[in-house]
Amino acid sequence: MFWHPLLLAIFCAQIVALVLVLTAGLTAFRTALHWQPHVPDSRQLALEAQVAAASIQGRAAYGLWLFAAFLLVFGIANLFHHSIPGAMCGTGVFQAMSGSGSKLLLYLGVVLLLTHLWYALDRLNGLQVDLPLTARNARLFLTLPPVALLTLIQTYQTFAAIVPYQPVDCCAVVYDQFHDLQQAESIIGLGDPWWLGVFLVLSLLLLSLGAANGFTTSDRPKTRLALAAVGTLWLPVAALTLVNILSAYHYGVLQHHCPWCLFLPEHGLVGYPLYGAMVVIAMEGFTLFFLPPMAGKAFQSNRQVTKRCRQAAQRITFAGGTFLIITLGPPFFWRLRYGVWMSG
């Protein structure tokens, strides 16, 4: 079992968040069964007070999960590799985890997406006097406790898989995946120029649709869904293009396809704003897709829903622009300085 002071902080944050959602989950269960806003009896009044308390507990759990996710990424990228022989970045830590690290990030991503959607609905619900989304939001909240429990269990299993003092070779993981130069200069059989072109086209679509949705007052459902769809396609393409092509201009060497070295201080810690922008696009795209249908006809005014979707589009536009500036800036500076691209 691997132990580290930061890991204890991650466990504490996840445990407290789990206790909060379990406590609030009991209220959500009662709310889903007995919520009757037009029946002002003692049980309904007591339930309304409990719903208000559960909302605070859910928001606190959301903050703790965000905090735990940041600590986890920071630990994997910048701290844990110092305690694992042969590891020089997060890739070495993942190698020591024996394949459990990806599962942990997946579970954590699911719980953050669900909680982010619940939080958006909860804020919208609080804007109406009769709280029309309370029962629906309670049913959504009931999905959080099991996912939170699975995330905590997966966190323990992931770090339990690390054998202390067993050396790893993260450079071998990065470079041994290629048998020849042609394979290193392609992704899934397609050349780097093709991926770069698709990335640029999707990025322009993302920014255009984000601006069209985020800086207009009218509601455009089809454009909103198009933005969510483009964002979903953009994420894997952007990740592959960043790691396999554009990261070379941060590293100063070709074919170093390591996603975790971007978080290191010697590379300017650019992994945090880059992957942070991708997280924002993923979470807000998820919100754009699911928030309007979940609010539905139960919500008296669509103006608040439209406003929240407009904010999501603005955040996607800002995050996408930040990603493009950080990823495309170094290649252009390299070209201006040396007169050629790194690939020749």
Image (tube, helix red, strand yellow):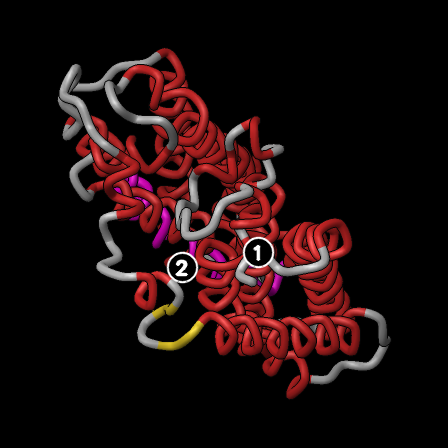
Measuring from the top left, give residue 237's x and y in whole percent: 48, 68
Q: Which comes sooner in the sequence, label 2 or label 1?
A: 2
Query: What residue lies at 53% left-to-right and 50% top-to-bottom?
Result: 247
Q: Which mark is residue 139?
A: 2
Q: Secondary structure at mark 2?
A: helix
**Label 1 crowd bin: few (<14), some (14–19), many (20+), radius 10 Å:** some
Amino acid type, label 1: Met
Is 132 rendered above or below residue 176? below
Q: Position of residue 230 (x, y in %)?
A: 56, 77
Say if the magenta span includes residue 109: no
In the rendered image, residue 333, in percent from the top left (x then y), is placed at: 74, 51
For the point 50% across and 33% down, which residue is it? 70
Work out which quarter of the rendered image holds the C terminus and state it.
bottom right
Tell me which segment is drawn in magenta.
Answer: 131-151
Asked if residue 259 is positioned above or below residue 239 in the image, the reply reads above
Q: CA distance from mark 2 to mark 1?
A: 53 Å
Q: Is residue 304 left or right of residue 183?
A: right
The residue that disc 1 covers is 342
Indicate whether 314 appears above or below 163: below
Please report the residue visible at 46 percent of the width from the left and 37 percent of the height from the top.
261
* Left or right position of 174 against 53: left
Task: Name the residue nearer the viewer: 304 or 340.
Answer: 340
